Image: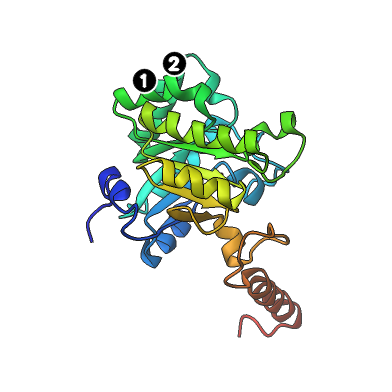
Amino acid sequence: MKKTSTRDFIQKKGAEKIAVLTAYDAIFARLADDAGVDAILVGDSVGNTFMGHASTIPVRLEDMFHHVAMAARAKPKAMLIADLPFAVCHYSFDRLLDACAEFIRLGADAVKIEGGASLAEKLSRLANAGIPVMAHIGLMPQQLMKTGGYRTFAKTPEERRALVADAKTLERAGAFSIVIEKADPLAAKEATESVSIPTIGIGSGPHCDGQVLVSTDVLGLGDWIPAFAKKYADLRGESMRAFSGFVSEVKSGKFPE
Ligand code: KIV
C-alpha cells in the first residue's frame, strides 16, 4: 500500500468514508495504520488522554514535537497530521510557520489548526508555503476557558450560518480538510455539502465525509468517554486484569516460576 497523499485524501470525498484515529506514539500509530485508517491525528488530546491534564490547554509545542516524532517513527502509510496546541496559531506568522515546518521536518504530512474564518489569512500563507492544513471548527477545546464548557455548536440559525461560512472560507483559504467537532448534525451536513474538501466529524452526526475518534475512547482505556464516542474494546478492564494478575503472582511467589 502506498502512502496516502493530501490529494488521495481529498479524492475520498464522495467516494468512500474517511476513518481517522488519534495516536501519540509509535506503537499506537502502527496499530492504527495496520488497522487501515486514512489518517492518524497526533492530537493535543494527548494532554487529557496520556499526560494527565484536565484539558488540552496545558499542552505545549515541545510536547507535540515529542509526540509527533514518536508517531512518525511508525512510518505510517496513513497521513500523519500534527495538531497545533493552544495559542500557537496566534503567534506571529514567522513563528507559526517555523512551528509547522518543524512538524513537517519531524515526519508529519500536515498540521491541524483549531479556528474559524479569522485564521483564513494565516492558513492561506501556510498553504502557500507548502504546509497542508486541516482546519477545525464547531467545538474548539482550546477555547474552553473562553466558552466555559463543552456544548453542541450550530444549533441556532446564526451559528449554523457561521459554521457553513467558516467552512467555505477555510476551503477558499486552502485547507485540504476540515474537522467539525460537536456541531448539530444538520449544520455539519450543510457545511459538508457546501465544500469540495472532506469534512471529518467528531460528535457531529453521520453526514460528514469521515469520522475521527480519540484512540483511548475507542479502546476503552480511560475511565470515561464522551457520549458521542464508541468503545470498541475494554482495554482498561483487560489491563487491570493483567496488572493485578502480575501483582498477585509476585506477592504469592507464583511468578517467576
Ligand atoms: O486533539 C484531538 O484529538 C482532536 C480531535 C478530537 C479532533 O482535535
Residues at marks 2 and 1, CA–CA distance in whole angstroms: 8 Å
The numbered dot on residue 77 is none
Quadrant placement of the C terminus: bottom right
Query: Can you give x and y, in whole percent of width and height, for residue 68 in the image?
Result: 45, 42
Query: Can you give x and y, in whole percent of width and height, for residue 229 in the image?
Result: 62, 60
The residue carrying mark 1 has its beta carbon less than 8 Å from ligand 1: no
Q: On the rendered structure, is 148 left or right of 139? A: right
Residue visible at 60% across and 30% down in the picture: 86
| Looking at the image, residue 103 lies above or below residue 181 | above
Q: On the rendered structure, is 54 left or right of 46? A: right
Query: Can you give x and y, in whole percent of width and height, for residue 242 in the image?
Result: 64, 76
Instruction: Kindly identify the amino acid type of the residue bearing the numbered disc 2.
Output: Phe
- Return the residue at label 2: 93
The quadrant where residue 106 appears: top left
Callout 2: helix, strand or loop?
helix
Q: On the rendered structure, is 229 left or right of 168? A: right
The quadrant where residue 139 appears: top right
- Are the two marked residues, 2 and 1, in contact with CB atoms closer than 8 angstroms? yes
N-terminal of the pair, mark 2 or mark 1, is 2
The residue carrying mark 2 has its beta carbon less than 8 Å from ligand 1: no
Instruction: Kindly identify the amino acid type of the residue bearing the numbered disc 1.
Output: Arg
| Looking at the image, residue 246 lies above or below residue 221 | below
- Return the residue at label 1: 125
In the picture as drawn, the residue positioned furthest to the front comes out as 157
Query: Can you give x and y, in whole percent of width and height, for residue 64 in the image?
Result: 51, 37
* Residue 93 appears in the rendering: yes
- Category of crowding for the residue at label 2, using alpha-carbon neighbours closer than 10 angstroms: few (below 14), some (14–19), many (at least 20): some
Residue visible at 53% across and 44% down in the picture: 180
In the picture as drawn, the residue positioned furthest to the left comes out as 2
| Looking at the image, residue 49 lies above or below residue 60 | below
| Looking at the image, residue 24 lies above or below residue 93 | below
